[in-house]
Image: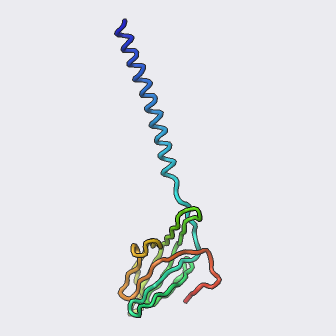
Amino acid sequence: MHGSLRNNRYIFFFVISRYFFYIYLVGGIVILSTVGCVQAERVSNEIGIFSGLDKITGRVTSFEVYIGQVYQYGALQIIPRVCYTSSENEPARTTGFVEVNEMTLERKIRRIFTGWMFADSPGLNAVEHPIYDVWLKDCKKSSHTLTSQ
């Protein structure tokens, strides 16, 4: 009888410890799933602000382009599709999805870049061209003095 009481205690502790293990496991999963879902809020903007470098003249030009509009910079056509900034209570982060076409000497349009540009890392996904470099600087909501070509 004394041995069976000891076995019952072990079974009891085993069941209780298993019960607490499942509680901790489910709690951990819930906590991790809520932490993983927290994302910085991004703000969609109407205008992308870019800089372009003409490697022949060494001249740097800044220009603003409405989302979905085409801006001609030398032989390049810059078309921003989206431009996001982080919300005011988050660290500054500016990203944009951009398409860049080149007008060839035969007057044909050739896509040379499609992708995300990051203002805080301009060299990461900047457009590299033999004559021109183009990179995203910032985004903004609207402008009354928008430069267009």
State the residue at coordinates (63%, 80%).
Answer: 143
Viewer-proximal residue among 53 and 129? 53
Task: Look at the image and tell me in which quarter the N terminus lies.
Answer: top left
Q: Is residue 57 left or right of residue 88?
A: left
State the residue at coordinates (46%, 42%).
Answer: 29
Displayed quadrant of residue 7: top left
Q: Is residue 5 above or below residue 95?
A: above
Q: Residue furthest right?
A: 144
Viewer-proximal residue among 125 and 88? 88
Q: Is residue 77 above or below residue 28?
A: below
Task: Look at the image and tell me in which quarter the C terminus lies.
Answer: bottom right
Coordinates of residue 115 in the picture (x, y in percent): 43, 72
Coordinates of residue 79 in the picture (x, y in percent): 50, 79
Coordinates of residue 30 in the picture (x, y in percent): 50, 42
State the residue at coordinates (38%, 92%).
Answer: 56
Coordinates of residue 63 in the picture (x, y in percent): 53, 84
Q: Is residue 75 left or right of residue 47?
A: left
